[in-house]
Amino acid sequence: MDKPPVEYRWALDAADRPVPITLARRGERYTCPLCRKEMVARLGAQLQHHFSHLEANDCDSESVSLAALRRWLALNFDQALNERRALPFTWQCSLCNGTHTQNLLEGVSHVLEDLLNAPESPDVRLTDAQGDPRAMFYLLGRDAPVPESLQDAVGQGRFAFALSAALLPASDDLAAFLASLQPFAAPCPIWDQAEVVRQPERLRRLLINLANRPPHYFFAAVETVDDLVDVVRIGRYKVWAALPFWLRAVGGTLNRLSPEVEIFIQNWDQPDDGTIYLYYVRIRETRAIALRRYPLHSAPSLHVDDRYRLLRFTALDMARELVSN
Ligand SMILES: [Zn+2]
Ligand SMILES: [Zn+2]
């Protein structure tokens, strides 16, 4: 049996610009964005229009789409930057539940395309004059894991996008494409104003300082504070405490008491003496953090009774129980 024909929806034109099949013209020269070999536009009446290689090849359509999308993004961003055009982008913010609009090219000086296709680095990067990324675009194949560096971008005040080949648009319209995107990570002006602590290192230092001060324990609910989602108040600080961020910054071993009751437990040995135990508690819809410093050769008993089965027992109740007696 013949293999089904592989669909290619985009190719590069003679000027090396990606072109969707909807804009292809008969008789033009096209090349494959992946293998760089010659392609033709099939614009017949029988089949859906598509590009095809002139010679046999191993290019799978997903990789060709991703290569075309990468080129297309990089060229469009570069062109907008050179023309000093703004690229307004509107998104639903997961940090404050609000809607924000920002120029994607604000503060951007360079557009970089990762031609080596390294899995951990973004495929297209918009950086400021110092080379720090303002926006990162990761183009991911169907079975590709979400890169660590992409997950680390959440809450760090810059844009990060995870794009699949399915997002390759049918037309050469960047504004329409941007309107369809949901960011994986994005800055939040409300957060910036409130100076929410969101750097892993700062969070760790804050927790250690807290444990070293009498009474050497602390507990607090993870809640929405002044429209800021997943925040803990620690003194005058508002600290971001979404679970994925906590696990990256603090870590912990999961103890699941029931499907709705989870406690992540971490311990940090201190250089002078003693150990700090840190807890992230989730009970139904409620969450809380707790910590306590124990002197050398002593450790928490970690006995919990089964009151957590009561519907009104919250994560804060559990957090208090874990560290305050
Ligand atoms: Zn090819
Ligand atoms: Zn926000």
Image (cartoon, rainbow, N blue to C red):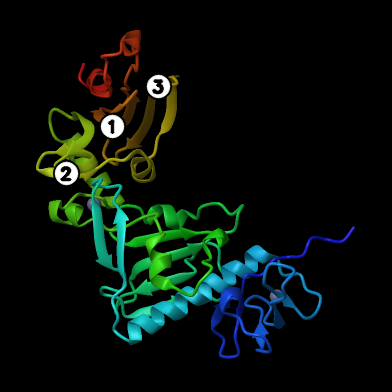
Where, by quadrant of the figure, is residue 275 drawn?
Answer: top left
Q: Position of residue 32 (x, y in %)?
A: 66, 78
Say whether mark 1 is within 8 Å of ligand 2.
Answer: no
Report the amino acid beneath label 1: Gly
Q: Nearer the viewer, residue 178 or 243?
A: 178
Q: Secondary structure at mark 3?
A: loop
What is the distance, in whole Å, between disc 2 and disc 3 at their CAs? Answer: 26 Å
The disc labelled 2 sits on which kind of residue? Answer: Lys
Residue appearing at x 40%, y 82% in the figure: 78
* x and y percentages locating residue 317 in the rendered image: 23, 19
Residue that label 1 marks = 274
Looking at the rendered structure, the secondary structure element under dot 2 is: strand
Quadrant location of the N terminus? bottom right
**Label 3: which residue?**
260
Q: Report which residue position mark 2 lands on.
A: 238
Residue 116 in view (yes/no): no
Q: Amino acid at mark 3?
A: Glu
Label 1 element class = loop
Q: CA distance from mark 3 to mark 1?
A: 32 Å
**Between discs 3 and 1, the one toward the N terminus:** 3
**CB at disc 3 and ligand 2 closer than 8 Å:** no
Front residue (pair 85, 51):
51
Dots 2 and 1: beta carbons under 8 Å? no
CA neighbours of label 2 inside 10 A, class few (<14), some (14 to 19), many (20+): some
